[in-house]
Amino acid sequence: MPITKSAQKAMRGSLRKKVINDRRKRTMKEIMKKIEKLVKTDKKEATKLLPTAYKAIDKAVKTGVIKKNNAARKKSRLSRIIK
């Protein structure tokens, strides 16, 4: 456990940021899984969800949850699955 007051404050802040980062990553993964499942049944519906997935991935990059190349790879794989 942190001893100094500044360390305690930093820990509280990092926990808040962790919650936000985890939420952003979870939404991104949920949309990607949804698309992968829809591709097997309804490709048109999966194509409609693609911009939503791109948006979630871009937001994750913007906030630093994932790296730029990782995002590019995820987008590429999603588009390849749909084609």
Image (cartoon, rainbow, N blue to C red):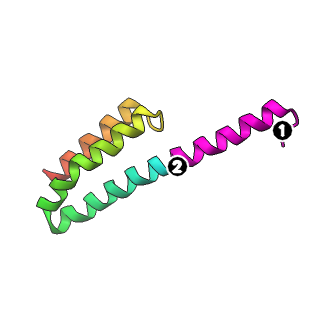
The crowding category of the residue bearing disc 1, from other C-alpha atoms within 10 Å (few below 14, some 14 to 19, many at least 20), is: few
Which residue in the structure is indicated by mark 2? 22
Using residue 6 as the reference point, say whether residue 71 is left or right of it: left
Q: Position of residue 70 (x, y in %)?
A: 38, 36
24 within the magenta span: no
Q: Residue at x 52, y 49 (%)?
A: 22
Which circle marks residue 2 in the picture? 1
Q: Position of residue 80 (x, y in %)?
A: 19, 46
Instruction: Please identify the dominant SS of the magenta region.
Output: helix
Disc 2 secondary structure class: helix
Return the residue found at the far right: 3
Quadrant holding the N terminus: top right
Viewer-closest of 38 and 3: 3
Viewer-closest of 81 and 7: 7
The crowding category of the residue bearing disc 2, from other C-alpha atoms within 10 Å (few below 14, some 14 to 19, many at least 20), is: few
Q: Position of residue 36 (x, y in %)?
A: 27, 59
Which circle marks residue 19 in the picture? none
Q: Please report the bounds of the magenta region as a residue range.
A: 1-22
Three-letter code, disc 1: Pro
Disc 1 secondary structure class: loop
Using residue 22 as the reference point, say whether residue 59 is left or right of it: left
Using residue 34 as the reference point, say whether residue 40 is left or right of it: left
Q: Residue at x 48, y 38 (%)?
A: 65
